[in-house]
Image (cartoon, rainbow, N blue to C red):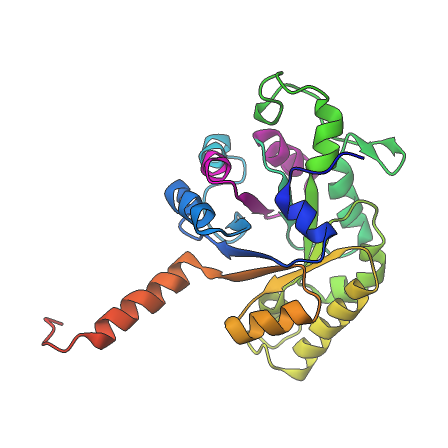
Amino acid sequence: METSTNDLRSALDGESTALGALDNTYSPALVELYGDLGLDFVWIDLEHAGPSPWDGPALDNLLRAAERSDTELLVRVPTTEPGLVRKALDAGVRNVFLSRVHDAADVEAAVRAARFEYDGEPGERGLASPRARRWGGVEDYVGTEDRETLVGVTIETKEAVENIEDILAVPELGFVFAGPLDLSVALGHPDELDHPEVAAAIETIEDATRDSEVGLAGLGFGPEDVNAKAQRGYDMLNLGSTTGALRGAVGSWLDDFEGTRSQ
């Protein structure tokens, strides 16, 4: 079997932890910078903000920046709609991240849409000559895409936690992302990440995923938390966001200023 050239998929198949950041400015320049800094992936969240997930040219520019700096885009789309999954993949996205799943049927429909061959049967990926195929220039396009594509889901609803075992059994699912923020809302404790019910749900996701062949992803809240989660078996961790890093840096500059400010 040929080795995948998708470094993020390769990381999930190995013993290392892939590290990335959320670029919530949607800037190709910053995607390129993150790649030059050595991040394994840059998370582009099209659920909560940013360009429309149907905006092909905007996605093209972000992809070019990632390709230029040898990093992977992790693109979260706002729904599990199969047509949206196919659209992102045809643009050249290799790592698709699905929001708001509830059960295995949601997940299977999206994963099947991402593949030409699925679990020994025909998949539901469309066959054309888009950017992903270099407009017809990629040999063995079907085999390459099925080998390189990675599909993950966010576990962020009460139903998804209850159905975690069935979700993990979906063929060709690459990873689950334990999402404490939206999960805290779904459980009735908004932004209370330390609430016992939220913590118990995250532990349920972690335990079930460790016993499966599916990768485990999540958020890192500072170096200590990132290191602890890596030790607990997380395969992929988000270290922070562009705006969070800027707030911290600019805030420290202002705090260190010893003169009189105009404000």
Residue 80: tell me if it is visible.
no
Does residue 23 appear in the picture of this structure?
Answer: yes
227 lies above or below 63: below
Residue segment shown in magenta? 62-91
Q: Is 46 above or below relative to 252?
A: above
- Residue drawn at 47 percent across, 46 percent down: 35
Q: Is residue 75 magenta?
A: yes
Q: Residue at x 63, y 75 (%)?
A: 188
Q: Quadrant of the C terminus?
A: bottom left
Q: Residue 226: x, y in percent?
A: 57, 69
The residue drawn where x is 73% and y is 74% is: 203
| Residue 201: x %, y % from top left | 72, 73
Residue at left offset 51%, top offset 52%: 39
Q: Is residue 247 left or right of residue 137?
A: left
Image quarter of the N terminus:
top right
Task: Note whether 132 is above or below 195 in the view shown.
Answer: above
Residue sitting at the far top:
136
Decide whether residue 126 is among the magenta residues: no
Instruction: Specify the farthest residue to the right.
Output: 120
Q: Is residue 147 above or below residue 45?
A: above
